[in-house]
Amino acid sequence: MGPSGLQRAWDYNRGVPAWLRPAAIGFDALMTGVFRSWVWTGLPSRRQWARPLLVGVLVGLLLLPLDGMLIELARWIDRERIVGGDVRRVLVTLGEYGQGVWLVLVAIAVWCLHPAGRRRLADLALAVPVLLVLVNAGKMLIGRPRPRDGMADLYGSIDFLGPLGQHPFAAAAHEDAVGVRHAWQILPPADLSDIHSMPSSHTAFAFLLSAFLACAYPAIARLAFVLAVIVAVSRVIERAHWPSDTALGAALGLAVGLVFVRRELGQRLVDAVRRWLGYAPVFRPQASTAA
């Protein structure tokens, strides 16, 4: 049996000063892990969902040490009114891209303007609830407080409550939730989302919608993803999320979108249901156009 990766790293870094050797070995191990993960995610059977998730996690980890500084920058932008007036209103409006009204408007546009593309809406319709479950599960398991002013006085950028973490909500501000609430409690009122920062659901659904539009209509792929990036930036500027929250949200939305749209899972489900009911399938799978 050959030497382990750790032993090879130790031998390779033997010439490094003793005080620096652990850091060099740790860096080698990290790069080895990243390389092997990149190869594993590149296999055709998992490339569509694994690569976006891996990139999102890595970007999130890189942003994590910068979260506090970037939120302070957002607070300064807000305090100095760098972004205000019509620009702020447009930013807030575009920040809802990917949410319910936008999804309905896109569905209506596709249904009315492109009858041949109607069957693709089944893929989007199935992806939405799946992503909703994944995002909310992440919020409950991670339990990260948002960087809003009231919460920023109590928690920093590296504070994670976890599923059993708890926060004492004030009775005056939360009449229906007096006292302590845990991170796994995700029911209304909406104010209790103050401990559900990671991942960003707005960013996740923006990238889901962009993935759908990019696969169905490649000509507008760049515009769709620009809108999704605007959503991520707006969530940070509004101090509703830490930057790393948006990275993980983008990864989840993109992964779910690419899998459901490119593999036409919604269309296949409709076909299966129709066959079960005794009807001829209408949604016949077709090769999706890559973005």
Image (tube, rainbow, N blue to C red):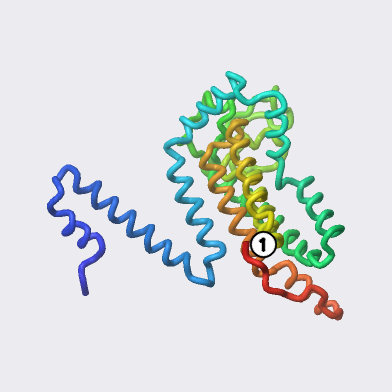
* x and y, in percent, of residue 129 in the image: 71, 56
Residue 189 shows in this picture: no
* x and y, in percent, of residue 19 in the image: 17, 42
Which residue is at the far top? Answer: 80
- Residue occupying image coordinates x 50% and y 30%: 155
- Residue occupying image coordinates x 63% and y 40%: 230
Query: Looking at the image, is 146 positioned above or below residue 186?
Result: above
- Under mark 1, the amino acid is Cys
Q: Nearer the viewer, residue 113 or 161?
A: 113
Q: Quadrant of the N terminus?
A: bottom left
Q: Is residue 201 left or right of residue 247?
A: right
Residue 148 shows in this picture: yes
Query: Looking at the image, is 133 positioned above or below residue 82?
Result: below
| Crowd tier of the residue under label 1, counting other residues whose Cα lies within 10 Å: few below 14, some 14–19, many 20 or above | many
- Residue occupying image coordinates x 52% and y 30%: 71
According to the image, label 1 marks what residue? 215
Quadrant housing residue 96: top right
Quadrant housing residue 10: bottom left
Q: Quadrant of the C terminus?
A: bottom right
Which residue is at the far front? Answer: 219
* x and y, in percent, of residue 111 in the image: 84, 59
Q: Secondary structure at mark 1?
A: helix
- Residue occupying image coordinates x 71% and y 60%: 217
Q: Nearer the viewer, residue 214 or 146?
A: 214
Q: Is residue 234 left or right of residue 277?
A: left
Q: Is residue 230 left or right of residue 43?
A: right
